[in-house]
Image (cartoon, rainbow, N blue to C red):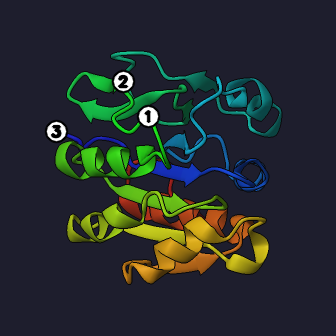
């Protein structure tokens, strides 16, 4: 039985939109991975599912309960929810940290390490605070790959800086180069089209 498709979690907040656009603009639509954008700004309803379709040929969807995870799609976390995965797909619960800096990226990454048997790629881009950093060593422990945005290319470097400080980052790259690395890893996974 074929393993589940690779999942790329892209976590960001302040300044993340620029990184999301630069990433998606450089990713092919048929590489065989599911992209999940977990935006750390949770107090307002997201508009990413309305903005980002301009920059990718992949469908961009706001996540709903029990939505199946399929390759060649971009999924967006809704506001005020923690995101988990299980055998049925995505599972949404009320946000566990409604005050202070949320940890929605960390929560999702930890759920992936427990429940996803496909390749996991964690990408931390521009944003305040250090959401996601605490889960990165767990990603490495299950054979996943962790990537941080190059600080000089991030308008708010706190999140990628915290990710790098975890000691569990495999690559530090500009968004365009992160896209190239995702394509390379996807080809090696054997799930999507093999790169020439």
- Rendered residue at 68%/71% (across/down): 177
Q: Say which quarter of the image contains residue 30.
A: top right
- Rendered residue at 72%/26% (across/down): 47
Residue position for label 1: 98
Q: Position of residue 188 (x, y in %)?
A: 41, 64
Q: How many labels sit on residues?
A: 3
Query: Looking at the rendering, in which quadrant would you find the N terminus?
Result: top left
Residue position for label 3: 1
For label 1, the crowd category at 10 Å Cα-Cα, with few meaning under 14, some 14 to 19 and many 20 or more, is few
Give the Cα separation between the discs numbered 3 and 2: 34 Å
* Mark 3 residue element: loop
- Rendered residue at 70%/52% (across/down): 14
Q: Position of residue 191 (x, y in %)?
A: 39, 48
Of circles 3 and 1, the one toward us is: 1
* Mark 2 residue element: strand
Image side of residue 15 versus residue 136, left or right: right
The image's mark for residue 35 is: none
Image side of residue 180 versus residue 87, left or right: right
Residue extending farthest to the front is: 99
Give the Cα separation between the discs numbered 1 and 2: 9 Å
* Mark 1 residue element: loop
Marks 1,2: beta carbons within 8 A: yes
Between 170 and 96, the one nearer to me in the picture: 96
Q: Position of residue 52 (x, y in %)?
A: 75, 34
Marks 3,2: beta carbons within 8 A: no
Between 102 and 59, the one nearer to me in the picture: 102
Marks 3,1: beta carbons within 8 A: no
């Amino acid at each position: 039985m074929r393993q589940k498709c690779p999942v790329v979690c892209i976590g960001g907040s302040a300044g993340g939109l620029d990184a999301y656009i630069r990433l998606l603009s450089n990713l092919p639509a048929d590489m065989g991975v599911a992209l999940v954008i977990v935006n750390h700004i949770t107090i307002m309803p997201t508009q990413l599912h309305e903005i980002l379709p301009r920059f990718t040929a992949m469908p961009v969807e706001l996540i709903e309960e029990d939505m199946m995870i399929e390759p060649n799609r971009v999924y967006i976390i809704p506001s005020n929810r923690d995101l988990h995965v299980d055998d049925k797909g995505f599972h949404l619960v009320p946000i566990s940290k409604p005050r202070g800096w949320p940890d929605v990226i960390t929560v999702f990454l930890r759920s992936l390490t427990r429940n996803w048997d496909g390749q996991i790629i964690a990408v931390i881009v521009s944003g305040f605070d250090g959401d996601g950093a605490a889960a990165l060593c767990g990603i490495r422990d299950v054979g996943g790959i962790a990537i941080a945005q190059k600080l000089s290319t991030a308008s708010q470097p706190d999140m990628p800086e915290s990710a790098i400080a975890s000691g569990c980052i495999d690559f530090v790259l500009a968004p365009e180069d992160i896209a190239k690395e995702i394509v390379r890893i996807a080809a090696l996974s054997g799930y999507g089209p093999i790169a020439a």
